Amino acid sequence: MTSFRVFACVVASGGGCGGAAQPTTVTAPVTSVATSQPQPPTARPAPAPSGTLAIGRGDFGTAHPTIVRRSDPGERWMSLCQARADTDGDGAIAVHTGHHGEMFGDTMAQYLVLGGGEGTPIDSLVSVSADSRWLAIVRGENLELVDTTTGALFALADADLESDHRPGAPHRAAMFAGNRLLFIRHRAQTDALVIHDPATHQEREIEITDRLWRIASADGLAHIFTVAQGGGFPQLRTSLAAGECLGPPMSYSTGGQQGATPTERWIDLDQGTEVAVDGLVASIGTTRVRTPASGALDLDSDEIAPPACKAQVLALVPSPPRVIAICGVKKQAKVLLLGKGLRVELAAIDRDKDHYGDHTDALGPATGVVCDAGLHCVTTATSQRIDLKGGVAQHAYGNKLYVVHATTSKRTFEILDVVTGTRTPIKSDDKKLATGKFIIDYSDQLIDLEQGTILGKVTDPMRLSTAGRVLKLAGKDVGPVRWTGP
């Protein structure tokens, strides 16, 4: 059995998902990797612009029932679900949410709004580039690339738009790898993984044997799942309602998968070749992080921890590639920073009692700091351990950490500068929202992490922008939506 990540977007009333979707781990049986190799990438002509979306100004959306699906931290665009017509004929426009997130009443439709205004109806917001400039959307019968700075549209020819109707997950058609878009072209015998560069609109194809079902993650390597041609897609057993315009579910359950058994595969995007999957857990650029069955820890073919390690990877550290990992068993276990010729002890733990997640739970992003789930942090430039003095890091920005210290009687907070070692106590609360250098705590205080100051209180914040402004609805669950100061 192998666990892989899909991304659930379960919305709260008026709130929806944040700037990044919330991950849900789904356990699925997978077959071993196919032995045939994809063909080297094939270049294709760049697509021409296929149209333009208007860039408006002012508030986002209209004065109707609203769920915010996604929003740009830079305030340039927003994806909204709104009911704008009396589709049930009862004389009013209203929506209601069922137990599992299903919507009743008037029909909710999704709109992409650039700059402000009413926006454009879309079927799906599929993926967002790392810099939030480029969006992949499904509209009608097309997968389109949107330049949110100009409104330019690029129709991506022959994209595979068949849905697997997976509740809580984005459409399977595409995923950004940083600022490169990966999407799927389906063919009768073999599919193609297409690499599209938005800067030049040049495309390369990598031939994939079997049917390409989902792109699970992508960096220098793409983590994909395939099924047999003509065999259909795996189906998720869940009570969560289908569709992208969901209300806040009171509860739902997930019970594994049925149907086709997927094959887990890794593809080198630059070489266009398939990578052996033996113990491969992640990539740092094109460097492969592996925990083979022996228990060792490898970066590419270099063993950085022996089989006795029984390694569990907690965080990935770039340039040069390093990992934070657990090594050892029971009370002899240690949390280590490991790389080629590098071994730094971060903590001694009891592996039977201290339970950790994996690298997808790591704290970030931050330019100067990498942490696991907030317990152990290192500087990326020097590989030095950061002494949290028993605290837990809740957010990182540049060289600053927002740290909580908990005792049986109280919780205290500080901002730690990892370069100078300066610790600035701050009368705040646990992190509620965070974007860039700004934090909103559970006392609704807006905190500037860089300056170490509390800027004031906010009310009813839904999102937080990189400018320190908050997103609010005009009324209770009713648009339009606007960015406002604290």
Image: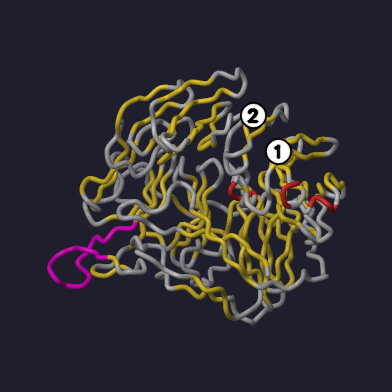
Q: Amino acid at mark 1?
A: Pro
Where is residue 32? Give x, y as percent: 76, 71
Disc 2 secondary structure class: strand
Label disc, if present, on residue 386 of the rendered structure? 2
Task: Report the magenta residues as a range.
Answer: 81-96
Query: Is 334 located above or below residue 468 in the figure?
Result: below
Query: Which callout, 2 or 1, points to the residue nearer the camera?
Result: 2
Q: Indicate whether residue 14 is drawn in magenta.
A: no
Q: CA distance from mark 2 to mark 1?
A: 17 Å
- The quarter holding residue 114 reads top left
Instruction: Name the residue nearer the viewer: 249 or 478.
Output: 249
- The quarter holding residue 107 reads bottom left
Q: Indicate whether residue 82 is drawn in magenta.
A: yes
Where is residue 196? Give x, y as percent: 63, 52
Q: Residue at the far left: name it.
A: 91
Disc 1 secondary structure class: loop
Q: Is residue 298 toward the left or the right of residue 216 in the image?
A: right
Give the residue at mark 1: 318
Q: Please identify the dominant SS of the magenta region.
A: loop
Where is residue 462? Give x, y as percent: 34, 44
Q: Is residue 415 toward the left or the right of residue 37 in the image?
A: left
What residue do we see at 35% from left, 55% from top?
12
Instruction: Name the residue nearer the viewer: 280 or 285.
Output: 280
